[in-house]
Image (tube, rainbow, N blue to C red):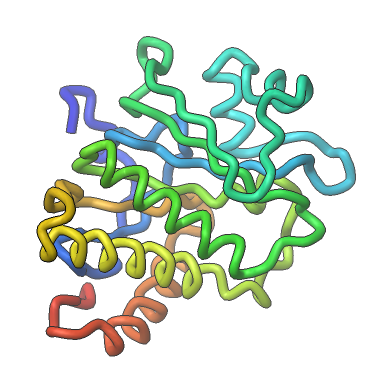
């Protein structure tokens, strides 16, 4: 972490560890995440034309409104798995780099889209040599408020763990360097952090049973 370590003040709840990576939930947004790669998701538009809100809006403002401008101009359409990488964030922003992953049409959102987005995020973090990453699904920021059917914690962890396992298999085969990633946080608003932490731990416990070799540990 940096000398201005925001992780010392943000609420942080453990989830578990797998493949040498510690997973947790942190009450911060993508613009405040003190990590090597902060990942946020973005739709082609918000539900009802309401505009960005929450952590995604804060990120857009921190970047001088460029996310909104790029989307309006069609330069970044936020189509499914389309990515935008900010390699030089403005001075004062904690993240060393920012990745935006497109989720497409918000009305067509389903679990597989989120699973794919987390896979993209994990792979990009590893390929950039990041030691710490954070992921914000930004679903609420687009106006999605009833997300129980998505089983978000399960599908996001499934995507992260699957991509992490693939990268370790490549390294074991001598086809890639071993991942340097050691920490992965999920961004959550402070009012929801406890409930999200409980849901993530429960999902991790279910998924850990399917991870071979006993390399996964569930947080107490």
Q: Position of residue 95 (x, y in %)?
A: 35, 28
Q: Nearer the viewer, residue 192 or 127?
A: 127
Q: Quadrant of the N terminus?
A: top left
Q: Is residue 3 left or right of residue 123?
A: left
Q: Is residue 51 left or right of residue 135?
A: right
Q: Quadrant of the C terminus?
A: bottom left
Residue positioned 68% across, 67% down in the render: 110
The number of callouts visible is 0
Q: Position of residue 184 (x, y in %)?
A: 29, 52
Q: Position of residue 204 (x, y in %)?
A: 34, 77
Which residue is at the far bottom? Answer: 209
Residue positioned 14% across, 77% down in the render: 215
Q: Nearer the viewer, residue 99 or 15?
A: 99
For residue 81, above or below residue 218: above
For residue 203, above or below residue 134: below
Q: Is residue 112 left or right of residue 17?
A: right
Residue positioned 40% across, 66% down in the render: 197
For residue 153, above or below residue 114: below
Residue positioned 38% across, 16% down in the render: 88
Q: Is residue 167 left or right of residue 123?
A: left
Which residue is at the far right? Answer: 48
Q: Nearer the viewer, residue 220 or 205?
A: 205
For residue 151, above or below residue 175: below
Q: Position of residue 67 (x, y in %)?
A: 63, 25
């Amino acid at each position: 972490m940096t000398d201005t370590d925001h992780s010392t003040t943000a609420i942080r709840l453990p989830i578990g560890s797998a493949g040498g990576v510690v997973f947790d939930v942190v009450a911060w947004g993508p613009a405040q995440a003190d990590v090597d790669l902060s990942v946020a998701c973005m739709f082609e538009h918000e539900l009802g034309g309401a505009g960005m809100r929450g952590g995604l809006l804060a990120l857009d403002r921190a970047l001088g409104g460029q996310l909104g401008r790029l989307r309006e101009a069609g330069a970044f359409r936020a189509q499914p798995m389309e990515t935008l990488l900010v390699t030089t964030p403005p001075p004062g922003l904690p993240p060393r780099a920012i990745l935006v992953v497109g989720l497409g049409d918000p009305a067509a959102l389903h679990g597989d889209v989120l699973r794919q987005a987390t896979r993209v995020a994990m792979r990009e973090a590893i390929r950039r040599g990041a030691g710490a990453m954070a992921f914000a699904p930004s679903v609420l920021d687009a106006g999605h408020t009833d997300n129980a059917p998505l089983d978000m914690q399960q599908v996001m962890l499934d995507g992260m763990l699957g991509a992490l396992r693939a990268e370790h298999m490549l390294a074991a085969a001598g086809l890639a360097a071993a991942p340097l990633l050691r920490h992965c946080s999920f961004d959550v608003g402070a009012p929801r952090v406890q409930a999200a932490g409980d849901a993530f731990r429960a999902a991790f416990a279910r998924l850990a049973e399917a991870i071979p070799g006993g390399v996964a540990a569930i947080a107490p």
